[in-house]
């Protein structure tokens, strides 16, 4: 963990998103914290990079988001 004041918030959100996606059988291999956003001001939480995925994963993600 870094000394960024929002580090816990960002890593918790990342872990929660990864778990929620896994619950739908979705894995985004590039899902991680956006390291360059740590270099910015500490007033904002770091960004979460969703990354790239193949079309089948994109479709599974779209289906999961469309399901109430």
Image: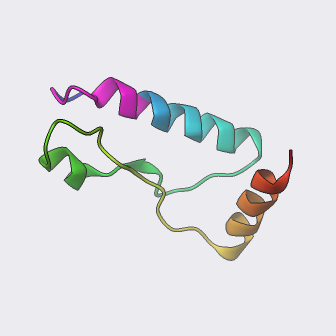
Above or below, comparing residue 17 to residue 65 in the picture:
above
Relative placement, left or right, of 21 versus 52 is right
Quadrant in the rendering for residue 63? bottom right
Q: Residue furthest bottom?
A: 55
- At 57% from the left and 39% from the top, the residue drawn is 17
**Residue 27, percent across and down?**
63, 52
Of the 4 image quadrants, the one containing the C terminus is: top right
Relative placement, left or right, of 32 versus 39 is right
**Residue 30, percent across and down?**
46, 57
Q: Residue furthest right?
A: 68
**Residue 58, percent across and down?**
68, 67
Magenta range = 3-11
The number of numbered badges drawn on the structure is 0
- As rendered, which of 29 and 18 lies closer to the eye? 18
- As rendered, which of 3 and 30 lies closer to the eye? 3
- At 51% from the left and 68% from the top, the residue drawn is 52
Above or below, comparing residue 63 to residue 54 in the picture:
above
**Residue 32, percent across and down?**
41, 48
In magenta stretch: residue 14? no
């Amino acid at each position: 963990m870094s000394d960024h004041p929002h580090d816990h918030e960002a890593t918790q959100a990342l872990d929660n998103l990864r778990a929620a996606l896994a619950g739908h059988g979705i894995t985004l291999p590039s899902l991680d914290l956006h390291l360059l956003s740590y270099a910015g001001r500490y007033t904002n939480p770091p960004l979460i990079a969703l990354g790239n995925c193949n079309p089948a994963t994109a479709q599974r993600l779209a289906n999961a988001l469309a399901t109430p």
